[in-house]
Image (spheres, rainbow, N blue to C red):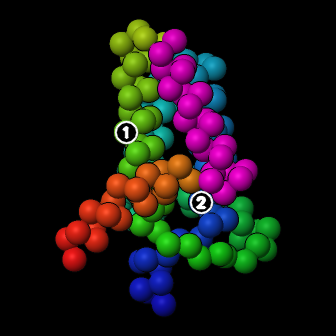
Amino acid sequence: MEQTKKYYTDENTVRLTAFFVIVVVSVSLFFDLPYLLLLLVFDFIIRASGLLFSPLALFSKSILKISGLKPKPIFAAPKRFAATLGSIFTLTIVVLMLTGFYNVALGFGLILILLAALESFFKICVGCYIFQVIVVPIQNKLK
C-alpha cells in the first residue's frame, strides 16, 4: 500500500488542484499580487518533491472526500515533472511582475492558466507529454 502512494497519485486530486491553480493565478494577475504566486511556487515545489502536505492538494483531497468520488490512481512521475515545470513557470511570472514587466507576466500567466485548464477540464497534461518526450528516452538510455 505504501508503495502505491509513492508511485501513484489520484487523478481527481490532480485535476481539482489544477482548477485551484487557475483560481490562484487569475486572482494574482487581476489584483497584481505577485506574493500570492510565490506561495503557488512553493506549493508546486512541494508537489514536485512528492511530499504529501501541499496545501492545494490537501484542499482538493478534502473536497473530493466530501464529494465521495473514488480515487483514480495514475502514475505520479509525469505529474511531479509537470509540477516542477509549473514551479519554474510560476517563479518566472513572479520575477516578471516584481521587475515591472507586468504585460509579459500576464502573457505567461495566461499560458499557465491555459495549461492548468487543459489538465483540469480535459485531462490533458502538457508537462506529462514533455516528460514522455524528454525524460523517458533519457531513462531508457541509462538502463
- Of residue 23 and residue 59, the one placed in the foreground of this image is 23
| Residue 119 lies in the magenta-colored region | yes
Split into 4 quadrants, where in the image is the C terminus? bottom left
Which residue, as the protein is rendered here, is positioned at the far top? 100
Vertical arrangement, residue 110 with respect to residue 116, above or below:
above
Tell me: 137 left or right of 47. Answer: left
| Residue 133 lies in the magenta-colored region | no
- Of residue 63 and residue 113, the one placed in the foreground of this image is 113
- Of residue 75 and residue 2, the one placed in the foreground of this image is 75
The residue that appears at 32% across and 64% down in the rendered structure is 137
Residue span colored magenta: 103-124
**Distance in Å between CA atoms under marks 1 and 2:** 18 Å
Q: Which mark is residue 45?
A: none
Residue linked to disc 1: 88
Tell me: 14 left or right of 67. Answer: left
Say few, some or many: other residues with alpha carbon within 10 Å of mark 1 (under 14 / 14 to 19 / 20 or more): some
Q: Are the residues tagged 1 and 2 within 8 Å (C-beta)?
A: no
Dot 2: what SS? helix
Asked if residue 69 shows in the view, the reply is yes
The amino acid beneath tag 1 is Ile
Question: Would you identify the image quadrant in which residue 88 lies?
Answer: top left
Residue linked to disc 2: 14
Vertical arrangement, residue 56 with respect to residue 113, above or below:
below
Which residue, as the protein is rendered here, is positioned at the far left? 142
